[in-house]
Amino acid sequence: MGRRYISSTLAIVVTAHLVFLSGCMEQKAPTPKLPKIERFVANPSSIIEGENSTLSWETKNADTVWLEEFGNVGINGSVTVSPAQTKTYMLVATNKNGSMTANVTISVTPLQEVLPNILLFTASSTNVTYGDTVMISWSVINADNVTLNGIEKPSSGSENFVMTKSSTFTLIATNQYGNVTRTINITVYSPTIYQWATSANASSEYNEEGDWSAEQAIGPPDTFECGDIETAWAPENASDYPEWLALYYETPIHATGVNIHETYTPGFVYRIELIDVNDTTHIIWEGTDDTTCGDMWFNITFPITPYLVKGVIVHTQISGYEEIDAVQLVGKLHLT
């Protein structure tokens, strides 16, 4: 009877131990805790170029948090951003068990799209003579206020101005996002000025002074017939070598033309240069001179020069003597 009791007791203990081991083997391992991004937002999510937005985030179970453009940041936090164009930001939360990623996009409207838009700002002419009328026209959209030279104007219109001096017209269109400015420069010139030379020199002269010298080309014409007459300039020799005659004027002007009085064997000019106030030369004409004794005048015109002209160089070449009586400089003054 004692043996049966011991055997029964042993069986119970073994059975209980096996049940306990079985229970331990069936128990599940704990689930790893992954990081979680509970919130990642941009406020506001749409901005105008130049404005700010705030990125905010909250995470859970994260050891580190990385934000695009900023690197490692706090587990929870916020930063201010001002992207120049639409941009998507990435947030990554990480721990030893893995990582989680979230994205948020900030839409950026280019400032140019919300600023005032000047559709039209023109002048009927930008180079005029004293007393001329210039029409300024404009058209603007997306503007709360429009001014022309500081005076408030409607969003579109036109206005006439009598010009007595060179002026700048400034149009400014404004709204809550800023302003846009455009300018037009109007250059006003004097009435046409005609000048005769006050001094002259040449590559060579038949005489250094007096008859046929370079000084004979100074002043208005005084040789009224086509012929070999001493009141005009002539070179030293009757050859076919190139020659030149340089003439200078009292008042530098913006030139528009040159008139040459050729009084002997006309048709010899092949190039004309202008001398500006900085002594720089500018070729203004090259070609064939078709002047005859019937008219004796070789006249050229050209667009008004942006530089002031103080002198003219006439280049000549012909077989024999060429003679020039006078050279007129034509142009205008810039009125400021």
Image: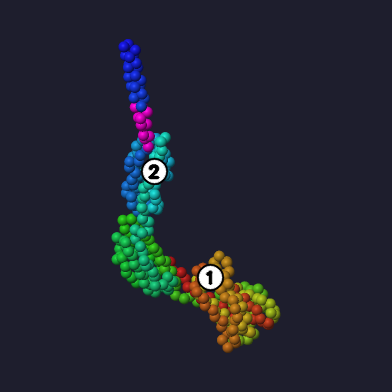
In the image, taking residue 229 as reference, residue 98 lies left or right, namely left
Task: Give the labeled residue for mark 2.
Answer: 101
Where is 28 relative to 235, above or below?
above
Most foreground residue, 186 or 136: 136
Residue at x 37%, y 31% (from the top left corner) = 29
Tag 2: Cα neighbours inside 10 Å, few (<14), some, or many (≥20)? some
Of badges 2 and 1, nearer the viewer stands: 2
Point out the residue furthest to the bottom here.
294
Circle 1: residue type = Val
Marks 2 and 1, the one that precedes in the sequence: 2
Most foreground residue, 159 or 248: 159
Q: Is residue 149 visible?
A: no
Where is 89 relative to 242, above or below?
above
Image coords of residue 107 (percent x, y): 36, 53
Circle 2: residue type = Thr
Q: Is residue 21 visible?
A: yes
For residue 92, which quarter of the picture?
A: top left
Judging from the image, what secondary structure is the residue with disc 2 in?
strand
Image coords of residue 196 (percent x, y): 54, 76
Locate the C terminus and report the quarter of the image it occupies. Answer: bottom left
Residue at x 37%, y 28% (from the top left corner) = 25
The alpha-carbon separation of the residues under discs 2 and 1 comes to 73 Å
Q: Which residues are magenta?
A: 23-34
Task: Give the labeled residue for mark 1.
Answer: 309
* Prevailing secondary structure class for the magenta stretch in the rendered image: loop
